[in-house]
């Protein structure tokens, strides 16, 4: 079994930055075809924020393009989400997700709260 553990959330003022980390208990590069960051705000559906495919290709939601960057450190089994120019609308619980090779099973982390407020 693989576990994903997020960290790095917190309270930040509008315009500020945070870096989220998602650490896997197994090799991210070997286990997952895709690793992504999702978020869920109160009363809203969970939405994809950014994802990185095993090949290194990245995709972003339109709402975060130019502000967020997803990256991967294979040696540390970690995927990062660098978030800059944060807005109140970015407030949500952020979840790490991994889609496994082969059976496409999904693994989810427990989530980390990001609050953007003055």
Image: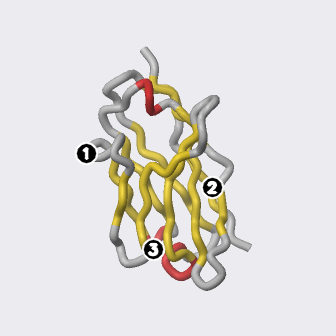
Looking at the figure, which quarter contains the C terminus? top left
Decide: marks 3, 1 in contact (CB < 8 A)? no
Give the number of the mark in front: 1 or 2. 1
Q: Which residue is pictured at 35% across the width and 64% down the height?
A: 58
- Report the residue that reaches farthest toward the top: 118
| Mark sitting earlier along the chain (3/1) | 1
Tell me the CA gap for discs 3 and 1. Answer: 26 Å
What is the CA distance from the residue labelled 1 to the residue labelled 2?
A: 26 Å
Tag of residue 75: 3
Residue at image position (51%, 76%) is 33
- Horizontal and vertical percent position of residue 43: 64, 30
Quarter of the picture holding the N terminus: bottom right
Specify few, some or many for label 3: CA neighbours under 10 Å numbering under 14, 14-19, or 20 or more: few
Badge 1: few (under 14), some or many (20 or more) residues near its Cα, within 10 Å? few
Are the residues flagged by discs 3 and 2 in contact, CB closer than 8 Å? no
Q: Which mark is residue 5?
A: 2
Task: Give the quarter of the image for residue 73.
Answer: bottom left
Which colouring convention does the figure follow? secondary structure
x 42%, y 45%: residue: 19
Q: Earlier in the sequence, mark 1 or mark 2?
A: 2
Which callout, 3 or 2, points to the residue nearer the camera? 2
Cα distance in 3D space between marks 3 and 2: 16 Å
Front-lying residue, 94 or 43: 43
Residue 13's quadrant in the figure? Answer: top left
Q: Is residue 83 left or right of residue 93?
A: left
């Amino acid at each position: 079994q693989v576990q994903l553990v997020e960290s790095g959330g917190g309270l930040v003022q509008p315009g500020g930055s945070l870096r989220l980390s998602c650490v896997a208990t197994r090799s991210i590069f070997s286990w997952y075809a895709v690793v992504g960051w999702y978020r869920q705000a109160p009363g809203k559906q969970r939405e994809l924020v950014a994802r990185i495919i095993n090949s290194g290709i990245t995709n972003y939601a339109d709402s975060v393009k130019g502000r967020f960057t997803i990256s991967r450190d294979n040696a540390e089994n970690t995927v990062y989400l660098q978030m800059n120019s944060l807005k109140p609308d970015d407030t949500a619980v952020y979840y790490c997700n991994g889609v496994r090779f082969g059976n496409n099973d999904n693994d989810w982390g427990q989530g980390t709260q990001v609050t953007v407020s003055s």
